[in-house]
Image (spheres, grey):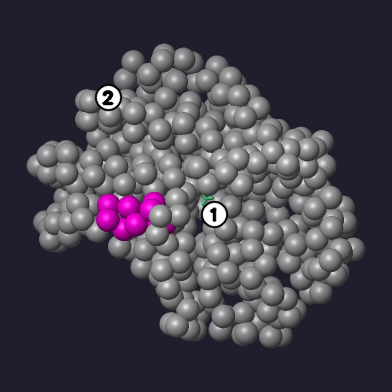
Amino acid sequence: MDKLRENWGSKLGFILAAAGSAVGLGNIWRFPYLAGENGGAAFIFVYILCVLVIGIPVLVAEILIGRTTQKNPVGTFKQLGKTKFWIAIGGMGVAAGFIILSFYSVVAGWTLGYIYEAISGNLMQYNLPDVTNSHFTALIQNPVWIISMHGIFMLLTMSVVFFGVQKGIELGSKIMMPLLFVLLIALMIRGLTLEGASKGLEYLFYPDWSKINMKVILNALGQAFFSLSLGMGAMLTYGSYMSKKDNIPSAAIWVAFLDSAIAIIAGVCIFTVVFATGQNPDAGPSLIFRTLPVVFTKITGGYIFSIIFFIALSLAALTSTVSLLEVVSAYFVDEKGWSRKNAVLLFGLMIFIIGIPSALSFSVLSGFTLFDKSFFDLTEFLSSNLMLPIGGFFISIFVGWIWDFEKVIENIKPGAEKIFMKYSWIFIGWKLILKYLAPVLIFIVLLSSIGII
Ligand code: PHE
């Protein structure tokens, strides 16, 4: 059975696919609005620090346990952790894949719908914030629109995962990631050449240190986890298709670098145009759907750039949804002996169905709330704020405390021999972070998520 398991065709294959998982709505939709709400440059500074100090070490740990076992999250913890408790942690990752994908695909569907809005010229008619607002609200309150966009996005996701690791995910990432990069660079150049762009840059890059407080730090760490796809086994599963020749630390640094670079480029694209046209940076989650369309009507070439923007966003989202569905499929393929094609079809359909209440949270089901949250908010909160940090916490504990450090080193060494010879102290620092710093900080984030602190 193991022999049939696929591997990445090349080292670049892993890096592009993993960067594809990491780069998504988290970078282009969530990062800019969080930066906007949390004081701009100060938030970005704390965010980068979180990626460097916690994100990369946990990312290395997650990829490492996947590559060691060459299995999905449940299989990995069965082999390494052995007890029911650890297997359940793997199971929570698979469940998180279901839940995150169900609401993520709804938002990804909006981006797809907005490609049409942009191409049809609809967006160009909305040059006042109030009008874009009501247009956006009308769309997300339309059950047919929102469910069909979510459905189409799930179909696109399924069609990539259907073709497997090399012919689906790797090939797809090799096409989509460079395209995304080119589109974002084009947008960035447009933003930078606008009169008044420097105000946006100032907002992004000149920190006002007085803005840093506990909330900013917590948001930054939570965002680092979400953006690096940590804590639910996506990176573990992608790591399981790596070979012993690949260098895990260097691949992890590449992925984190590309992820952060794209978040910052997206920030530049968005804030240069937002400031140049005198809009507010702190519009929150609807920043790109309500604020940006107004901006596009005010700049030369706005029509073309609005199309480019929403295509870029959909591509970024697609390489992320693919990684979420892959976790679920890998579990059923490895552990339950399903064929990949059946797993993709059945679970793709199931996730589509689970996503429907999230999609309807803005209309028919808006009155249905639990703990004061709609179904959409609840699934987002449960997965991003609870399941991912809990998963990350236990991955750190597992590699830091439970797994023999000798075994850890024996498994991380292949492919990274050179780093070992020259900088073996890095691995000691890494171990200390996984043992103490990461679990403590993540624990604090968790407590704050559930409102205890
Ligand atoms: N990292 C993705 C993004 O930034 C979201 C994601 C989270 C994907 C967890 C997979 C797993 O959009």
Does the magenta segment cover residue 48? no
Kind of residue sitting beneath label 2: Lys
Work out which quarter of the rendered image holds the N terminus and state it: top left
Q: Position of residue 91 (x, y in %)?
A: 39, 29
- Above or below, 339 against 192 in this view is above
Tell me the residue at 26%/47% (across/down). Answer: 396
The residue under label 1 is which amino acid type?
Gly
Disc 2 C-beta below 8 A from ligand 1: no
Q: Name the disc covering residue 84, or none.
A: 2
Query: What is the magenta segment's predominant secondary structure?
Result: helix
Residue on which disc 1 sits? 26
The answer, for residue 240, to whether it is visible in the render is no
Query: Which of the two residues, 191 or 285, is positioned nearer the viewer here?
Result: 285
* Range of residues picked out in magenta: 439-448
As for residue 440 lying within the magenta part, the answer is yes
Mark 2 or mark 1, which is nearer to you?
2
Quarter of the picture containing the C terminus is bottom left
- Is the distance from the Cβ of mark 1 to the nearest ligand 1 atom less than 8 Å? yes
Q: Earlier in the sequence, mark 2 or mark 1?
A: 1
